[in-house]
Image: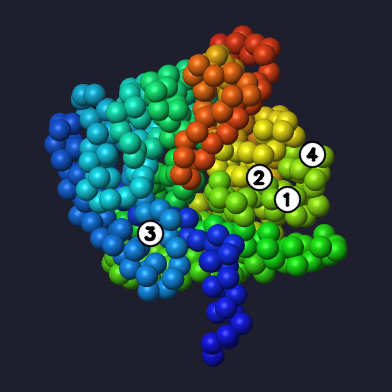
Amino acid sequence: MLNTYDILETIRMIQDQCLDIRTITMGISLLDCIDPDIDRSCEKIYEKVTRLAQNLVKVGNDIETEYGIPIINKRISVTPIAILAAAAKGDPVKFARTLQRCAETCGVNFIGGYSALVQKGYSAGDEALIRSIPEALAVTENVCSSVNIGSTKTGINLDAVRLMGKIVKEAAERTADRECIGAAKLVVFCNAPEDNPFMAGAFHGVGEPDCMINVGVSGPGVVRAALAKYPDADITKISDIIKKTAFKITRMGQLVGTVASERLGVPFGIVDLSLAPTPAVGDSVAHILEEIGLERCGTHGTTAALALLNDAVKKGGVMASSKVGGLSGAFIPVTEDAGMIEAARCGSLLIEKLEAMTAVCSVGLDMIVVPGNTPADTIAAIIADEAAIGMVNHKTTAVRLIPAIGKKEGEELEFGGLLGSGPVMKVNANSSSKFIARGGQIPAPLQSLKN
């Protein structure tokens, strides 16, 4: 039986509290597009992706209209392109240009999967693809890239970490005339999930089916509004409120995923139970933490409050969906979160505190702007630190740093849209070069030996 209160509550969530489905992402396997002739491989990719995803945007728009649920992004993720590059001779950037054509033909916001998995070392095609990333991201608009450099099971590939420090810097330099957007489309992972619907880190893992639909939910504004009704509640009550709110948000994601799967004729994969913020007022994870009781995000107690939030989101969301995966939890991207931007501007939120927060949140150091003269080895060391947190704690961590070429601490980059804007944050000036230059493999931790 329909409950009028529940209907009105959902309408309020959508109209006043920025509730939305952040993305429906179609994952497509390209394993059957492998070909020693790179041009033929690209033709196969274009044919398959455009055939399977030709109605993705239309179906998303139809669901928005019929159910009144905003679906902000429609995206595609594909098999890590390094696997196809291993078999084909030629410039890997041809694959990136093909993916761009696919995105334009299908009308999607982003296409992810210009990726390599090198947590234990390079195989054929990996290094060539990684070295091509700056050019690939510079000559395309909608292509996103990711590299997995570590895992709990294998340890951390420090040689790959060192290379990624250089790649991140070069990606920013190649797009310096566009606010260094190349680096904003590149993620470096530890323990990368194979079914993540969120960009820039989405790729379609080799263990996934041929084609599937994954959904990423959002709703920080809804959680904050729910907490605002209980200004004097104890922390146990706060957790319970978040769980109940996350349940409602995730049910909407389950509905959208189920309907999209049926209409597109492909399996429904997972709902990612994430609170994904935006620069819009009232849609901030930082503001949830402040509603819990912090004067400003970044002050003492921030990590504990974020741990509570992340745990409650997962507990509430997992009851609402039969298929949960991806990253799942609370995201803390600086430039994409109005509250994080404010906290960074006033000096309350520092990179060191953000690193501590990543030990208990959904992903990692995300959308952080650093000075343009930051050395590549320092960027690599930041990646290594974040990967170590993921490796030791059996969790996904990631780094998306944007070196602001030509800018220094206190200045700002302005991306616009969901990527937002943010201040150039201070980076420790002491060198990590000798550590990074050692290379080799940081061994897997003892807790990896579970068999």
Calculate the distance from the C-alpha at mark 2 to the C-alpha at mark 1.
9 Å
> Circles 4 and 2: CB distance less than 8 Å?
no
- Spot the residue most to the top: 434
- Residue 332 — which label? none
> Circles 1 and 4: CB distance less than 8 Å?
no
Q: Earlier in the sequence, mark 4 or mark 3?
A: 3
Which residue is depicted at the point 69% across and 50% down? 287
Amino acid type, callout 3: Ile
- Residue 213 — which label? 3
* Mark 3 crowdedness (10 Å alpha carbons): few <14, some 14-19, many ≥20: many
- How is this picture coloured? rainbow
Which residue is depicted at the point 30% across and 33% down? 140
Q: Earlier in the sequence, mark 4 or mark 2?
A: 4
Amino acid type, callout 4: Thr
Q: Earlier in the sequence, mark 2 or mark 1?
A: 1
Nearest to viewer (mark 4 / mark 3): 4
Which residue bears the numbered disc 1?
289
Which residue bears the numbered disc 2?
339
Q: Earlier in the sequence, mark 3 or mark 2?
A: 3
**Camera sees residue 256:** yes
Amino acid type, callout 2: Gly
Which residue bears the numbered disc 4?
299
In the picture, the quarter occupied by the N terminus is: bottom right
* Mark 4 crowdedness (10 Å alpha carbons): few <14, some 14-19, many ≥20: some
Calculate the distance from the C-alpha at mark 4 to the C-alpha at mark 3.
39 Å
* SS class, disc 4: loop
* SS class, disc 3: strand
